[in-house]
Amino acid sequence: MRTLSQLTEGLKEAGRRHAEFNRLFVIFRASLATQLSEQDIPVEEPGPGPLENGAFDLGFAGRTLRFRFYALSREDALLAGAISCYLVHRDDPARNLLLHRFLFDEAGKTDLPNPDKAGQANLDISYHADALHIALHCIHISLPRLQE
């Protein structure tokens, strides 16, 4: 068992990290909204939906994708940010399909390699172009999936 001091400090740090990850998720959504508009990507209006309970929806070609933020515990007992993208089932939320999940750190750097920079960098959720890249990747992998 940890000491009271260790528990107190550890939980303060976890709360601080969670708040930072949440702030980065808000930036990710805002960056995505900006880029979808500027790049004239034909998403369903109004673009990324409002943030509700750590998630937002994005419609494309008659389907809805849900991007959900949460924090995961790492081996070093610190939290890591995570975003999962689901294909939303129209009638039964229990049948939502996980399309993709990735982790990110306090700076926004993900565990996703940037294919445009061949091994030199990972995508960053706080960069406009990278936010768009991640979302378009999720849309792309959703296309062959059935949504019955």
Image: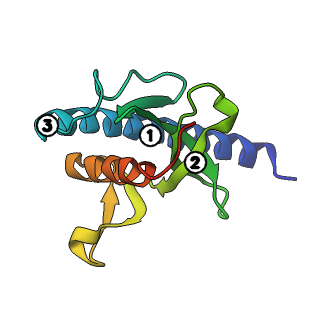
- Disc 2 marks which amino acid? Leu
In the figure, is residue 95 to the left or right of 55? right
Q: Is residue 105 above or below residue 121?
A: above
**Residue placed under numbered mark 1 in the picture:** 20
Q: Tell me if mark 1 has few (under 14), some (14-19) or many (20+) residues whose alpha carbon lies within 10 angstroms of its own.
A: some
Residue 12 is situated, as x and y percent measured from the top left of the image, at 61, 39
Lower sequence index among marks 2 and 1: 1
- Disc 3 marks which amino acid? Asp
Residue 75 is situated, as x and y percent measured from the top left of the image, at 67, 64
**Residue placed under numbered mark 3 in the picture:** 40
- Disc 1 marks which amino acid? Glu
Q: Tell me if mark 3 has few (under 14), some (14-19) or many (20+) residues whose alpha carbon lies within 10 angstroms of its own.
A: few
Residue 81 is situated, as x and y percent measured from the top left of the image, at 51, 48
- The local secondary structure at tag 1 comes to helix
Instruction: Determine the image quadrant of residue 92.
Output: top right
**Residue placed under numbered mark 2 in the picture:** 98
71 and 55: which is toward the camera: 55
